[in-house]
Image (cartoon, rainbow, N blue to C red):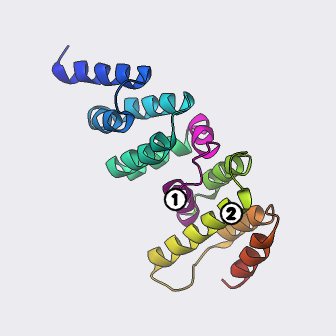
Amino acid sequence: MNQKTTRKYELITEIGSGVGEHIKNLMELVAIDFTTAFDMWEFALSRGCGAGVVNEGLDVFMRASEQKAKTEIAENGALQKLIFSSPHAGMENVISFLASFIVANKTDEAGKMLSVLRANTYLDFNDTMRAVVDSAFNQSCVKNQTRVPQFNKKQKTLLLEYIEKIKGPNKALLLQRMKEI
């Protein structure tokens, strides 16, 4: 067994046992084996690790390979549930990650994530959905270099479907904002 493989197994053992710094270990493991690092991140999340593992872990994978990270999460319903049903799902980079699927017109994947987010008992869905819409609007404006977000019919339908599930003042505000685009 070579030194790289030995280190990989040491990192897996440390992450699995909860010893050491999860994020530092994930960063090193990502450089060695992206897929194994993702599996270990899912394992750490399933053991109820804190906000840093959710928030910073997502950042580690997005920096290493945004496309691979998005593909892995989009194809892994269990991981989506761990991320979007956690008490930390309302953090800015998690919301931004979800909004990026809406802006990229990956509405099926975004719909699954929104469904898990809506069932999250730790967060106020009204405020969280407003953050998702705000992030999607901002990302759309940056992507298209416009002052007004641009969404196609599928994107609008998805957003409206979840805005309709809101109760309270955010619903009226978001419905008005959607009418303006």
| Vertical placement of residue 161 versus 149, above or below | above
- Which residues are the magenta region? 76-104
- Verify whether residue 169 appears in magenta: no
Mark 1 or 2, nearer chain start:
1
- Is 127 in front, or is 29? 127
Q: From the top left corner, tell me how far across and down residue 63 is, in percent.
A: 34, 51
Instruction: Decide: few, some or many residues near mark 2? Use Cα within 10 Å; few <14, some 14-19, many ≥20.
Output: some
How many badges with numbers are in the image?
2
- Please give the residue where the numbered disc 1 appears in the rendered image: 92
| Residue 60 image position (x, y, % from top left) | 37, 46
Q: Which mark is residue 127?
A: 2
Percent of width and height locating residue 58: 44, 46
Residue at x 65%, y 43% (from the top left corner): 85
Residue 50 shows which numbered tag? none
Task: Determine the residue located farthest toward the left in the rendered image.
Answer: 3
Q: Nearer the viewer, residue 154 or 177?
A: 177
Q: Position of residue 114 (x, y in %)?
A: 67, 53
Q: Circle 2 sits in a helix, a strand or a loop, which is it?
A: helix
> Would you say the magenta stretch is mainly helix, strand or loop?
helix
- Report the side of 1 relative to 38 (left or right): left
Q: Is residue 27 above or below residue 65?
A: above
Check residue 78 for magenta coloring. Answer: yes
Q: Quadrant of the N terminus?
A: top left
Give the quadrant of residue 28: top left
* Residue type, numbered disc 2: Asp
Q: Quadrant of residue 36?
A: top left
Residue type, mark 1 in image:
Glu
Residue at 66% from the left image edge and 67% from the top image edge: 130
